[in-house]
């Protein structure tokens, strides 16, 4: 079970999760791509003193003490970014017990505060992230400029340092052919769309991450309100597209949904790409009330639990690609019983 997916979230039929990420650097210490091991340890110690001494629900995890498999599981479950793995001797992260808050240390910036919540929950995510940010700022001095705001390694993060993103499931817009039109419109108004694992990843399972591009010239509240407004419009369009499919292509859609469910329940070999496509169809079927005995929560968890490293981790052994595809089908059959 993916801990941060637990609980109710607004618009949960379309929105899987909300992520808030704040980028910060400590004044007077070189950025991670230039720092020494001693400087990296200094940053880790600063964060440790601020966090662990004030909240014992966090634990520190050093990247160089994790196996390659464990590192990839943390990435697949969205608890850390792939970039945190690039300098294993220098980086670490602090993970809250419920796994909804991660503080990554020495990724691209000294500090990346991440909040993950189920459903559309931007305001609560910002509140939680801001509380951690205030705690850290009370214990150290951030790199900050009166004109530009928070200074970051990448110029696109300068200003608020805020990246807010919402993961949405849009199978009906894909099936009706309107998805490209929607995505182009989103890009034109200053938002960006990425796949399941962020920049450079594909939209596996018709999952899209919509996030802000602008961190300079607008407040955090303005950024969140703008993103929320656009996401609500996209949700409305996805629901309308589902209704249109039911009214005009009902038999075709029912066949796609039931065929996908049948394959998931009976297949003995399943790649991650195929399973994501089929789970997407079944998830759409649940939302259309075609399928009534499978929960959205089950599908949401499976979409993460069937990724390569997660499958291997569940079986505590080294698996070939072929063996992993067999184990993946076993996991799916167990969770989606007939």
Image (tube, rainbow, N blue to C red):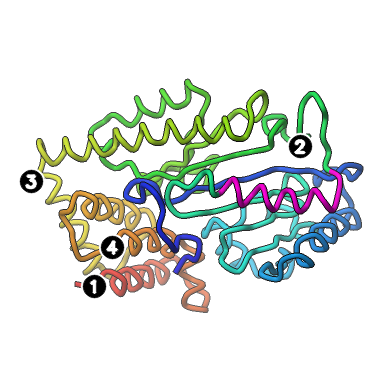
Can you tell which of label 4 and label 1 is closer to the viewer? 4
Q: CA distance from mark 4 to mark 2?
A: 42 Å
Left or right of 216, for residue 271:
left
Is residue 117 magenta-colored? no
Q: CA distance from mark 1 to mark 2?
A: 48 Å
Q: Which numbered disc flags the more N-terminal residue, 3 or 4?
A: 3
Is residue 126 magenta-colored? yes
Q: What residue did someone put label 2 on?
A: 153
Which disc number belongs to residue 337? Answer: 1
The magenta stretch is: 125-141
Q: CA distance from mark 3 to mark 2?
A: 52 Å
Number of residue marks: 4
Q: Residue placed farthest to the left in the image?
A: 251
Give residue 81's position: percent from left, percent from top.
61, 52
Q: CA distance from mark 3 to mark 1?
A: 24 Å
Quadrant of the drawing holding the C terminus: bottom left
Q: Which numbered disc flags the more N-terminal residue, 1 or 2?
A: 2
Q: Residues within 10 Å of mark 3 (few under 14, many from 20)?
A: few
Q: Which numbered disc flags the more N-terminal residue, 4 or 1?
A: 4
Q: What residue did someone put label 4 on?
A: 295
Q: Which numbered disc flags the more N-terminal residue, 3 or 1?
A: 3
Q: Residue placed farthest to the top in the image?
A: 188
Q: Which residue shows up at 55% across the image and 64% down it?
A: 73
């Amino acid at each position: 079970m993916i801990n941060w997916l637990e609980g109710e979230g607004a618009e949960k039929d379309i929105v899987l999760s909300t992520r808030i990420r704040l980028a910060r650097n400590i004044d007077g210490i070189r950025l991670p791509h230039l720092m020494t091991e001693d400087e990296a340890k200094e940053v880790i110690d600063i964060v440790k003193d601020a966090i662990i001494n004030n909240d014992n629900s966090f634990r520190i995890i050093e990247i160089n003490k994790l196996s390659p498999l464990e590192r990839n599981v943390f990435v697949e479950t969205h608890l850390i970014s792939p970039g945190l793995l690039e300098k294993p001797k220098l980086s670490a992260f602090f993970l809250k017990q419920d796994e909804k808050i991660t503080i990554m240390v020495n990724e691209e910036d000294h500090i990346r505060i991440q909040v993950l919540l189920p459903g559309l929950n931007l305001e609560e995510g910002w509140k939680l992230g801001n509380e951690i940010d205030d705690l850290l700022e009370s214990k150290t001095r951030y790199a900050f400029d009166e004109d530009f705001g928070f200074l970051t390694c990448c110029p696109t993060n300068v200003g608020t340092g805020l990246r807010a993103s919402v993961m949405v499931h849009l199978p009906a817009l894909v099936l009706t052919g309107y998805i490209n039109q929607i995505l182009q419109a989103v890009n034109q108004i200053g938002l960006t769309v990425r796949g399941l694992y962020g920049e450079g990843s594909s939209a596996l399972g018709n999952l899209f991450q919509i996030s802000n591009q602008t961190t300079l010239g607008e407040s955090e509240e303005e950024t969140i309100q703008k993103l929320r407004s656009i996401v609500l419009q996209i949700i409305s369009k996805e629901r309308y597209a589902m209704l249109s499919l039911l009214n005009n292509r009902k038999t075709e859609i029912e066949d796609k949904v039931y065929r996908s469910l049948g394959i998931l329940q009976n297949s003995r070999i399943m790649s991650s790409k195929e399973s994501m496509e089929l789970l997407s169809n079944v998830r759409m079927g649940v939302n259309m009330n075609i399928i009534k005995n499978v929960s959205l929560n089950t599908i949401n968890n499976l979409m993460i639990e069937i990724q390569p490293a997660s499958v291997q981790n569940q079986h505590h052994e080294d698996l070939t690609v072929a063996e992993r595809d067999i184990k993946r089908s076993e996991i799916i059959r167990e969770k989606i019983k007939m």
